[in-house]
Image: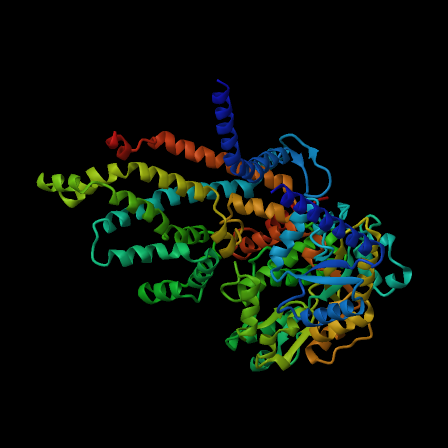
Amino acid sequence: MMKKTKLLAVLLMLCLMTGLGAQGQVDSGVQKEVELRWASIWVGNDSKAPAVEALVNEYNAKNAGKIKVVIEPQPDYNAYEQKVRTSLAAGQAPADIFTIKFNPTTATFYQSNLLMDFSKVMSNSWKQTFDAGSLEQSTVDGMLKSLPMETAILPIWYNMDAFAQAGVKALPTTMNEMWAAFDKLKAAGITPASQMTGDTNAWTSMIWFSHFAVSLGGTNVWDKPFTDPAFVEAAKLTKRMITEYSTSDAVGLGAGGSGGHFLAGRTAVFSNGPWYAGRADLAATPFFNSIKIAGLPAAGSTKDFMISRLQANICAASTKDKAKEAAILDFMQYLTSPASIARIAETSGAMFAIKTDYRPVKALQKQFYDVASAAKTTAFDLEAALGAEVTLEFAQQLGALALGRISAEEFCALVDRKIER
Amino acid sequence: MQAVGTHRSRIWGARALFLSPVLLLFFFFFLYPFVFTIATSFTSWRGIGLMKFNGVANYQKLLGDPTFRKALGNNVIWALSQGFIQVPLACLVAMILVRKPKGWRMLRTVYYLPNVISTVALAMVWVAIYNVEGPLNAILSSLFGMEKRNWLGNPDTALFAVIFQTVIYIGYFMIILLASAMNIPRSLYEAAQIDGASTFQQERHITLPMLRGSLITTMTLAMAYGMRHFESTFLMTGGGPAYATTTMGIDLYLRMDALRYSEASTAGVFLIVMGTLVITLLRKIFGSSDPMSEMAQ
């Protein structure tokens, strides 16, 4: 019995020593592979998913044994946003690489030491590949803790087949022409516009409101108090749009319903970003080829502008591990290179803050690029300019405004109290 | 003497060993978050950066916020609806099913079925039912010529529309009450029948008093659910329109969404206090005596 125990102890010691020796060999000889976790929202049905996956696979193949990027799929955006918020609050980066929707609320993340500050590590040549305005918008107190990646313009979509059916052949160029066209659509039994007050941002109507507000108050309108006459007038126009020219379920309706009305041909005008252009259900509609992308007719003196936003900024976890930091920067440079971005843009139709020579060939996606380049200037939408809390108040009170529970002045005063100054 | 001491310490050691997993879980998943919530409610903290002590500023802010007051009021309506509509409905059905009418087993399953279906799926079904072009409006307009309504989009109807789709699902409370009702000795009913008591009198003077303990338990549970209500309202209306359907749970969630963590903690403390208050009040009013256990004695 004693002999057996001794033998077992010796064997265990031998195993331990062999293991340690082997470990030492790895450390001293072979370079350890750095694994980077990317919590990616560009997965599943997202139009950017195939190109992103291919790029990651190619990068991994090229850096085999040195760097490996592992995509952690985040198909549910709301759950993903929660994950980012709670991870950072718990003192942990959600992943080595992750994206945020940059706005005044998420700019709070810049206070965290968990995020890498690119302003300290970016080379000039890398910086120059980005759109300078987007880089500036992503910089807070001199810190660049997220790189602008996906951008978007938020134009108005017109189903020209529906317009033709109502006897309207051209896009309205003035507000009066637009009301007249909408009246004709109504007379033809077509609801003119998709509007909504549901979800946390009343997305579709928020875009319309942003167009009206910027046209009435200028591109710096978001710096003004929300009680400014430009906002009051924009609120009145949005209310008119909802009560007279939208579907009867607009109050309380979510983005899915609003988009659904347009896809089903129940409404003739809609608003959304370029990512919607790549949808298969949109391509399957009989009016797909008739869709025209443009701005709204000017409601005020500011013309030829386009509403835009930083749709997704990419962040990296700060690390003291130099090898990991180098790996992160290497991958980020690869991902944001004009060549990679052109490939993602080609398959998705999305727009990016990185300058490329890519020009889309698909008609609808091409229209987005044309509209963006034709705009003399751009201005943020309400959510991008004022953050999540103000937008939530906007959405909640928009329902009350549309139902006539509050006046446009009261509406603006209620939203104004949520703005932090 | 020493042997007794060793035996005692062994027993205590075993007790500590068996209790430690649950104590650890209790500490990490209840006590720590509970204390953390209370502590952060007295700070100014956005989830990132240092916490700054700000006294009762968050409490003052929340009490002065009409949205939060609306949420608090709505939670009281929820608690009352669940306690005084859903539970009595469940009790009524349990009293019918305990008499084992034809097909009672199938009915019991049918009533309980919604409890095994996901809240998300149910909420989506009800969003479709309440839609302007949905079946509810179609039925009401064809039967009574009623004008089509946007049930969830109108602040006058939205709260009651959401409450209705919750209180009609009585299965959970019905099962508890049915189990209790089935334990009532049949001899009591037989004696009452010999004395000439009608069915109504039997229910009034035997079933209801015998179910008193279970009724208090189910009402406590229902009202506690009402005070912390979140899911179906969030899914169906997001708390809108114009905060008409918001609840403390939704308010808490949206404050977290806006990175106002310390305010969300304050809302959480209010939730705990209100829940405790409702349960205490209920116990004070109805007492907690259980006639079944009294009879057993």
Say which residue appears at 80% left-offset and 60% top-offset: A134
Residue A347's image quarter?
bottom right
Identify the image quadrant of the N terminus of chain A.
Answer: top right
How many callouts does the rendering have? 0
Q: Does residue B28 lie above or below A325 as drawn?
A: above
**x and y percent of residue A192 in the render?**
56, 71
**x and y percent of residue A394 in the render?**
61, 53
Say which residue appears at 87% left-offset and 61% top-offset: A127
Say which residue appears at 60% left-offset and 50% top-offset: A393
Q: Tell me if I can see residue B40 in this picture.
A: yes
**x and y percent of residue B180 in the render?**
28, 42
The reply, left or right, for residue B275 in relation to residue A333 is left
Q: Does residue B240 lie above or below A355 as drawn?
A: above
The reply, left or right, for residue B97 in relation to residue A288 is left
Q: Nearer the viewer, residue B256 or A259?
A: B256
Identify the image quadrant of the C terminus of chain A.
Answer: top right
**x and y percent of residue A7 in the render?**
67, 46
Q: Tell me if I can see residue A304 in this picture.
A: no
Q: Nearer the viewer, residue B211 or A108?
A: B211
The reply, left or right, for residue B251 in relation to residue A106 is left
Farthest residue in the top direction? Answer: B1
What scheme was used to colour the molecule? rainbow
